[in-house]
Image (tube, rainbow, N blue to C red):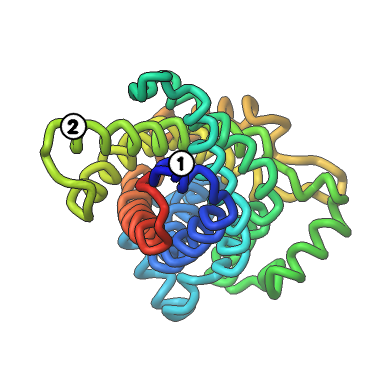
């Protein structure tokens, strides 16, 4: 008879479904914070947006100028992205982690968890990059509306069609390098820290394998993931938002070029633009996701993550 761990290990399809379901709930709950973070990271790219701002002021302006539903612009491609991204990275991490488990049942070292988390996140991001590109472009479109200009895209399908027509199929993977770099750092911090923090909480009896333990672990992993990934996230957002001009000229030639120009024009602190809204999103997102996922696993008869 299989133990709960063995039972959990032999149900990859159930895990894929449950991670996608949990990610949809988490993404819908925290999406307005993600949109605010994206707009904040793009703030300062043009001379018309040189005045300093903050997340609250930016979110208030969006609601005032475009209505509350504008905070959900780009939600559908974001959910579509998570249907691929989250199941691959979560289930992939758990599978790779099991390969490093000691024969005596000992825990996996933190540095191995970090490497496994980064690898699984990178693979997942390559697959989900087109949906991520559409999401960023649609979120950035809201700035044009606030300036009285016509948005570039009327919806996700229109954005997908125009990107392919104007930039080719390969255009769907624009910014994939900084995207993967960010995914590696995010998942290195998020998955490894959540896993390690949860084990620490359980082993030291700070809390049980319940909502309190999951909340503590998710807060720690959110801080680690944000600190590591914010610079790559800023570069990724700007690389993915840029569109090639009619002359075929792009604002940034590479991730490194974007990094250098951002620091040169806006200073080193610009690389951590959107830090607090990023953490404010990752914290609630991970709380909703992990609590939901752990609960769903329990209901499905699977072992804890």
Query: Residue 30 falls in which quadrant of the image?
Result: bottom left
Secondary structure found at label 1: helix
Which is more toward the observer, 170 or 287?
287
Instruction: Confirm or deny contact between disc 2 and disc 1 (CB under 8 A).
Output: no
> Can residue 58 be seen in this snapshot?
no
Query: Residue 63 falls in which quadrant of the image?
Result: bottom left
Secondary structure found at label 2: helix
Q: Which mark is residue 6?
A: 1
> Can residue 245 be seen in this snapshot?
yes
Q: Quarter holding the C terminus?
A: top left
Q: Residues within 10 Å of mark 1 (few under 14, many from 20)?
A: few
Residue 38: % across, % down:
49, 53
Q: Is residue 65 left or right of residue 89?
A: left
**Against 98, is 100 above or below?**
above
Q: Is residue 25 left or right of residue 127?
A: left
**Against 270, is 23 above or below?**
below
Q: Quarter holding the N terminus?
A: top left
Check disc 2 and report the residue beneath it.
Answer: 203
Which is more toward the observer, 223 or 278?
223
Residue 157: % across, % down:
75, 70
Q: Residue furthest front?
A: 1
Question: Number of numbered discs present?
Answer: 2
Whichever of callouts 2 and 1 sits on the residue coming sooner in the sequence is 1
Please identify, in this view, whether the residue under mark 2 or under mark 1 is nearer the observer: 1
Q: Residues within 10 Å of mark 2 (few under 14, many from 20)?
A: few
Residue appearing at x 21%, y 44% in the figure: 216
Q: Is residue 150 left or right of residue 197?
A: right
Residue appearing at x 43%, y 66% in the figure: 25
Query: Residue 14 falls in which quadrant of the image?
Result: bottom right
Q: CA distance from mark 2 to mark 1?
A: 21 Å
Residue appearing at x 37%, y 63% in the figure: 299
Residue 17: % across, % down:
55, 60
């Amino acid at each position: 008879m299989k133990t709960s761990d063995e039972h959990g290990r032999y149900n990859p399809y159930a895990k894929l479904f449950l991670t996608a379901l949990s990610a949809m709930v988490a993404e819908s709950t925290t999406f307005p914070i993600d949109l605010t973070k994206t707009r904040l990271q793009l703030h300062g790219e043009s001379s018309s947006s040189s005045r300093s701002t903050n997340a609250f002021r930016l979110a208030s302006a969006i609601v005032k100028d475009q209505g509350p539903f504008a905070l959900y612009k780009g939600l559908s491609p974001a959910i579509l992205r998570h249907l691929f991204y989250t199941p691959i990275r979560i289930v992939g991490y758990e599978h790779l982690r099991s390969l490093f488990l000691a024969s005596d049942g000992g825990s996996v070292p933190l540095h191995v968890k970090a490497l496994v988390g980064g690898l699984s996140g990178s693979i997942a991001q390559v697959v989900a990059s087109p949906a991520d590109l559409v999401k960023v472009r649609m979120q950035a479109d809201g700035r044009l509306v606030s300036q009285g200009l016509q948005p570039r895209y009327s919806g996700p399908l229109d954005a997908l069609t125009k990107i392919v027509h104007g930039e080719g199929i390969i255009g769907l993977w624009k910014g994939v390098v900084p995207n993967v770099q960010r995914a590696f750092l995010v998942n290195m911090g998020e998955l490894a820290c959540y896993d390690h923090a949860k084990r620490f909480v359980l082993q030291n009896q700070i809390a049980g394998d319940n909502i309190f333990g999951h909340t503590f672990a998710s807060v720690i992993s959110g801080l680690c993931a944000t600190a590591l990934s914010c610079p790559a996230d800023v570069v990724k957002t700007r690389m993915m938002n840029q569109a090639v001009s009619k002359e075929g000229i792009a604002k940034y030639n590479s991730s490194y070029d974007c990094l250098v120009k951002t620091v040169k024009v806006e200073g080193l602190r610009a690389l951590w633009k959107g830090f607090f809204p990023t953490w404010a999103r990752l914290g609630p997102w991970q709380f909703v996701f992990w609590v939901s996922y752990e609960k769903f696993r329990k209901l499905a008869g699977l072992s804890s993550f």
